[in-house]
Structure formats: structure tokens, C-alpha cells
């Protein structure tokens, strides 16, 4: 019998029993299904060896059980770490200036936006921006100049707008 056919027959014959076993062990159908499928995947990778075992189903069952236990231990460790250290501190949202800058950057043509971000926000020198974007340094300088000019217009307060209410 070809290797694929023998594995398919083994899988069809044993999958429900293995699922039932792991479901009883874990108490969670989704966890049981995941562990059994992972164990079958590992069995398939080693099928030329596993099929020669006296009880291949016992091998898959053991592997599935170990996978389930390993996941349970990882989850338990995460819970303990959370209890010990508490939740991570909240991440503050962007300030009004950052929101205004991102909105203004979004109005620039993409090449200018990329040049401005790489040079001014990331801190790359002009030559590195040119290398990363695949354009000559003169082109980067022109994009930076045009982009800065447009940003200045977009970010400057409108003198005709009445700010006193």
C-alpha cells in the first residue's frame, strides 16, 4: 500500500477516537481538535517511521496529549505573569500635533511623503534615503524641499481664521 494511502486509512480510522480522547483530557473541543491535527501533521512528516511502530495511534495520542499540555502550560505561565506584573501600561494616543502632521503628510504626493518621513522622522541622511528609495540624491533633495514647503503651508495657521471666540 502506498505511503499516502496507508496514512489516509490510518487517519480515517483513528481521528474520531483521538479527538474523543483529547476532548476528554482537555475539556475543550477546539483545543482537542487543534492538538490532534497538529499531532497528525507530525505523524505525516514521519509516517515512514511511525507506521512501523506497534501502535501508531498511541504515538499520535501521546504527541497530541503533549501538545495540549504544552499549550496549557504556556497559557498558565502567561496568566501567572499577568497576575505578577499586572496589565501593560496604557499606550497614550497621539497628540494633536502628531495627528495634524500625519494628516498633512497624507496630502503630500507619496514620493515626497516617503522622503520627508525617512529623512526627518526616521533620521536617515539624504544619501541613505536616496539608496533606500532608489533615486538620485538630487531627486531626494528636491522632494524634501517641495514637501517641506507644502507642509509649511498645510500646517501654518490660517491668518484669516478668527481664533478668538
Image (cartoon, rainbow, N blue to C red):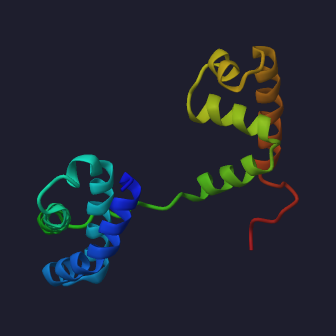
Q: Position of residue 56 (x, y in %)?
A: 18, 61
Q: Is residue 140 above or below residue 163?
A: above
Horizontally, residue 104 falls left or right of residue 46, namely right
User: In which quarter of the view is residue 87 placed?
Assistant: bottom left
Query: In the image, 160: left or right of 42?
Result: right
**Residue 72 in the image, given as x and y percentages of width and height:** 16, 68
Hey, which quadrant is residue 7 in on the image? bottom left
| Residue 38 x/y as whole percent | 30, 62
Q: Is residue 142 above or below residue 24?
A: above
Q: Is residue 83 visible?
A: yes
Q: Quadrant of the N terminus?
A: bottom left
Which residue corresponds to the image point at 20% horizontal and 63% vertical from the top-left?
A: 60
Q: Which one is nearer the viewer's eye here, 66 or 1? A: 1
Q: Compared with residue 109, is residue 69 higher up or lower down, i.e. above or below?
A: below
Out of 164 and 34, give the one closest to the viewer.
Answer: 34
Vertical placement of residue 129 versus 66, above or below: above
Query: What percent of the width, then of the height, locates residue 12?
Result: 35, 73
The residue positioned farthest toward the front in the image shown: 1
Quarter location, residue 140: top right
Amino acid at each position: 500500500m502506498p505511503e499516502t494511502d496507508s496514512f489516509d486509512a490510518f487517519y480515517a480510522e483513528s481521528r474520531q477516537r483521538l479527538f474523543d480522547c483529547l476532548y476528554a483530557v482537555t475539556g475543550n473541543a477546539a483545543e482537542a481538535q487543534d492538538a490532534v491535527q497538529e499531532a497528525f501533521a507530525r505523524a505525516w512528516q514521519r509516517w515512514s517511521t511511525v507506521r512501523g511502530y506497534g501502535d501508531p495511534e498511541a504515538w499520535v495520542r501521546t504527541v497530541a496529549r503533549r501538545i495540549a499540555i504544552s499549550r496549557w502550560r504556556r497559557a498558565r505561565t502567561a496568566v501567572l505573569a499577568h497576575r505578577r506584573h499586572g496589565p501593560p501600561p496604557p499606550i497614550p494616543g497621539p497628540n494633536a500635533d502628531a495627528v495634524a502632521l500625519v494628516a498633512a503628510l497624507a496630502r503630500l504626493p507619496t514620493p515626497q511623503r516617503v522622503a520627508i518621513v525617512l529623512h526627518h522622522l526616521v533620521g536617515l541622511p539624504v544619501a541613505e534615503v536616496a539608496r533606500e528609495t532608489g533615486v538620485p540624491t538630487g531627486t531626494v533633495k528636491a522632494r524634501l524641499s517641495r514637501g517641506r514647503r507644502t507642509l509649511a503651508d498645510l500646517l501654518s495657521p490660517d491668518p484669516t481664521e478668527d481664533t478668538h471666540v
